Amino acid sequence: MDFTASSATLLNIKADSLILATGSQLENSAADLDKSLDGAISSLVKAGDFSGQAGESLVIHIPGSTGKRIILIGSEGANTVQRQIKVIEAGAAALLKTASSKAVWVGEGLTEDAEWEASMVARSVQAASYKYQAVPETSAKKPKPAKLKSVVYWTPKKSALTAAKNGLIYGASVGNGMNVARQLGNLPANICTPSYLASQAKALAKGQAKVTTSVLSEAEMKKLKMGSLLSVSAGSDQPAKLIVIKYQGTKASVKPTVLVGKAVTFDTGGISLKPGGGMDEMKYDMCGGASVIGVMNALIENQLPVNVVGIIPATENMPNGHATKPGDVVTSMSGQTIEILNTDAEGRLILCDALTYAARFKPDTVIDIATLTGAVIGALGKVTAGLLSNDDELADALLASGTKSGDRVWRMPLWEEYDELLKSNFADMANIGGPQAGTITAACFLARFAKTYKWAHLDVAGTAWVSGAQKGATGRPVPILMEYIRSKAN
């Protein structure tokens, strides 16, 4: 997809679609367009066909033209970032439903921030254009390429052109990063194995001077004494991989942001077997790792001047004769021992060794991303991810990044009273804290391995994918992670 910005005379820009966000009161460019169409837009408003409410859409085919249209998107009440994003996403969805090949997006009337709006337009159009790409092993069919080839973001202010162009580059990279994460998440688990993820991470680094990828084998992890991570892979025929992707966009002396993404490519629960209903969706238990790869893809496209390290512990969680059993005690890389009371609480077991490993990069901050607990869905639903952190400044920065990107998170407490629930009679800690506060006790467990640096945990079990007829990965939390990383570059 090609994204450009322009401040030329609006009606002189050649395109077959024009997207216009407006309320019921037509102003500025909306009023000018209505006049050029002999009142076609205002007549639809008067007839009640278009109310202008935020997110509403209506396609008008221009009389006397062939295949040309105006897409009206309601913007009334869009006085918050979240509602403005709703308007833009509605416009992108409506545009992709047409046969348009080149569109003009009128950047007027929604917000004064051209860079932000342009970035959201590019991100939303890219995300709306995603189509699942089946691999040859599962299907010979290929999705038809989108007809839309280019979008022009139009601003009435020449002074805003540079900001708009920067926004388009950034937004397109985030949208593509989301789509990379979605594609990996949507692949079936017999294709997207730990080894497959490792191969994709290696392919990402090919030809990229700023990116290097290394993959640790189980033998190497054993030498590092990653007994917790390896206890999860013990029941699988698929070998675990520890994937490390380094993006160096600035001088080496700048401490990196380290992203640690949980990648359980399929989670049966192990010996603590999950119910069969809906188990197919456990292929999405690697969406944390997929989001890290998505962020790296976006960084490569955007070339941000930052240093970022991605660590992805990748494994299956399967029940066979070698599988870890409830009651087993394992020793983590940190030397702390863990009594495994539930093998379905496996994400924290692979993350804790990865968090210990992260310290060797002398990080500025560490953020782990994981589809960790069903409890977070009970607390926050499918709207927002859970955030827990040992550093208030980091937590505040992530909250702000979530608001700006529309990929919101909500902070939950990380108190000693919850940590005490992890007590074990036979090890330094248990891997679960009982039936209450499951999201918090899971984070308390991880916090024990992140004491030497600023750390935050994102529980994305409710936001990384959707179920039902629209089942599929969402690409979250790539937007908030990219917004946070971009804030570090400024």
Image: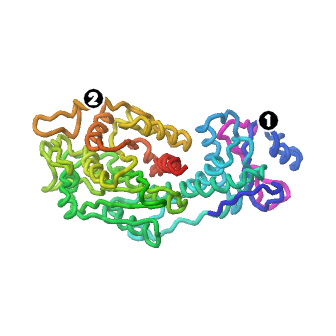
* x and y percentages locating residue 326 in the rendered image: 15, 43
For the question of whether residue 280 can be seen, the reply is: no
| In the rendered image, the vertical position of residue 7 relative to residue 435, given as above or below | below
Q: Nearer the viewer, residue 173 or 371?
A: 173
Per the image, the residue denoted by label 2 is 416
Which residue occupies 26% across, 47% down?
Answer: 352
Circle 1: element type: loop
Instruction: Look at the image and say whether residue 56 sits in the magenta stretch.
Output: yes
Which residue occupies 50% across, 59% down?
Answer: 299
Question: Quick check: 234 left or right of 366?
Answer: left
For the question of whether residue 124 can be seen, the reply is: yes
| In the rendered image, the vertical position of residue 322 relative to residue 31, given as above or below | below
Lower position in the chain sequence, tag 1 or tag 2: 1
In the orientation shown, which residue stands out farthest toward the left? 426
* x and y percentages locating residue 369 in the rendered image: 38, 47
Q: CA distance from mark 1 to mark 2?
A: 55 Å
Which residue occupies 70% across, 42% down?
Answer: 112
Residue type highlighted by circle 2: Glu
Q: Quadrant of residue 13?
A: bottom right
- What residue range appears in magenta? 47-73
In the orientation shown, which residue stands out farthest toward the bottom? 207
Which class describes the residues within 10 Å of circle 1: few (<14), some (14-19), or many (20+)? few
The disc label shown at residue 25, or none: 1
